[in-house]
Structures are given as C-alpha cells and as structure tokens.
Image (spheres, grey):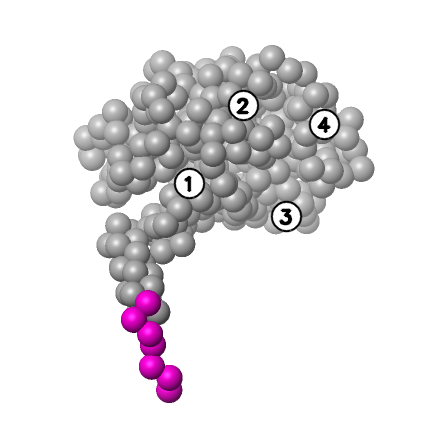
Amino acid sequence: MSRLSKSSRRSLLSTVSIAALALCAGLPAAHAADSDNITIMVGGINKIIYLPAKLTEALGYFKDEGLKVELQSQPAGVDAENQLIAGAVQGVVGFYDHTIDLQAKGKEIEAIAVFCKVPGEVELVSSKAAAAGFKTMADAKGKTLGVTGLGSSTEFLTRYLVDKQGIASKDYSLLPVGAGNSFIAGMKQDRIQAGMTTDPTVAQMLKTGDAKVLVDMRTEAGTQAALGGLYPAASLYVRNEWAASHKPQAAKLAHAFGRTMAYISTHSAEQIAELMPKDYYGSDKALYVEALKASLPMFTKDGAMPAGGPETVLKVLSAYKPNVKSAHIDLGKTYSNAYLANK
C-alpha cells in the first residue's frame, strides 16, 4: 500500500473532521460543508394541498434564495415525518398536526411556513356503499375506511369524525390505501367503503361517478362545520433544533414559500397549472384546473399560521389521543412565523 503524502493526510483528516462534526450535529455529512443544500420530503408531491412545494421550485424561488433544494415524495405524511426525525431530510411538507403529536412523544418539530388554512381533505363514500345506506359518518359502524397510512393526518381526522358520532374504534376498521390510483383501486374493489383523500383524486372519482362526498374540508365553512374551527394543515415543518442552528437557511425557505403563497393568491388556476409537470394531470388537464380552482381558497396568502388554528388542531387530537391530552402541549413550539419576517 502506498504511503499518503502530508497534503493528502491533511485533506483526509479535514474530510473526516467535517463528517464527524456533521454526525455530532445530527446532520448528514454531505450537508456539513454546504448547508444551503436542503432535502425536503413531501407527503405525496402531486397532491394539490402540497402544490406549493413543486410550484416554488418551478418559479425559481429556491434558487433566488441561494438554496439548492431537492424535493422527494413519500405517499404518506407519517413516513416523511420519520425521515425527518431520523435526520435523513431537513424539512417535510406535510400536515401541521404532526408537530403536536410528536411533541407529545418528546420530539420537537415546528412549522415555519403554512400553506393551507384547512385540511383540503374530503371523506368520500363509494357510490355502491352510498346506495346501500352509507349517508353520513354516523353510518361508519361496521365499515372499512381508507386512510393514506396509519399514524397519518388522514387517520387523525378520520378517527375524530367517526368518534364524534359516538362510534367506538372497535366498531369500524381503518385500512392504509395510500393516495391517487391506489386509493381509487381500494374503493373500486370495495376494500374500503369510504376514505379520506384530496384533489385531484376527489375530482377524478366524482367525475366518474364512483364516489360521493360525505365530508368536505376544502373550504373554511366545511371545515368549521366538521372540526369547529380553522385547521391549518399542509405546511413546511423542520426540527426545532435544526431551525435554531440554521436560522439563515430556515428564513430562506420560509421566504421562498411565502412568495409562492403570494403568487397563488394573485394568479389563476390556469396560470398555476401551466407550471406543473404534465404527469400531475395526465391526459385531463381541464379536470386538474377544475380541481385546482376548487382548492385555491384553502391556501394562505403569506405562509403565516392562521390565528386560532393551532388551538383547533390541539382540540381535535386531544379528543381521542390520551397522550396528547395529558402532555400539556406548548403550541408556541409547534410553529413560528418569525422566519417569514427575518433573514
């Protein structure tokens, strides 16, 4: 084996030192030398509720902030959350309610940009089940309900809506069926009689006549009726520790998404759809635009947390999660608007 020169040894030691520091900080070594390289996991990147992630990239706002952002997709938000906790990614685009659930488990993550004031979720019932008498959530007894994944926000919301009708958890079943085509297949095959999903899947199933709406949480009025208040949902969340030690990067991310929310509030569904990849809408762009039009009111205009929203989310989770109810949650640690204002 050849002996290393002094310069080679110094280079090797430097590389090892950087990697060691990265490990000590709980960050991947690849990000130690260039912390403006950021990986964000999205809980289903083609869902309209998470559209701001891809739109920010398409508009060039990440680059404007000097960031190199890689977007990855994970069908269920709970899986994306696990990647964040493991330190494999720096941020997650998912539901804000995970920040509260995780704090109850001793882990601190915070939303630094909020995309949606409401869940954007719809509880669909198959046309077959509806014809057989499944008309409201009170008819869920003995049925199998679809969610994206166990531990996901769709599970949180589904349980709340059913439990509110006085139906015990043992009297209905939850089945993880993912989103998009896998959700559609689950309902068509009658593996689920109802399930929670988002646009554009909602628009597709209503157009084909395979499903009907049971609960619509795409609007403020529908969400107020179902949950009793605004329910901030889709957001960018990061580990509190990471945000504190990477304030410039956290602020750049928040700024980029804040600009995107302003763009959404001032542009048409048609203009936004033009910036989306073709595989987001396939052969039916008109249907995608229609779904997008129905969804635009749910987005925030600036990325800030809506007043009263965190309290509604805490109420919903506390209703059926004993660990959340007894945890004395500090909502101030579950989100921050500060990064939108500072840089």
**What is the spatial separation of the Cα atoms under label 2 and label 1, in whole angstroms?**
19 Å
Residue, disc 4: 274
Sequence-first disc among 1 and 3:
1
| Number of the front mark, 3 or 2 | 2
**What is the spatial separation of the Cα atoms under label 1 and label 4, in whole angstroms?**
28 Å
Give the residues drawn in magenta, as a range: 1-7
Q: Pointer 2 and pointer 1: residues touching (CB < 8 Å)? A: no
Secondary structure, magenta segment, majority class? loop
**What is the spatial separation of the Cα atoms under label 4 and label 2, in whole angstroms?**
15 Å
Viewport quadrant of the N terminus: bottom left
Residue, disc 2: 260
Q: Pointer 4 and pointer 2: residues touching (CB < 8 Å)? A: no
Residue, disc 3: 182
Q: Whole-percent x and y of residue 63?
A: 53, 33
Sequence-first disc among 3 and 4:
3
Q: Residues within 10 Å of mark 2 (few under 14, many from 20)?
A: many
User: Which residue of the protein is positioned furthest toward the front in this rendering?
Assistant: 6
Residue, disc 1: 36
Q: Secondary structure at mark 3?
A: helix
What is the three-letter code of the residue carrying label 4? Glu
2 or 68, nearer to the observer: 2
Sequence-first disc among 1 and 4:
1
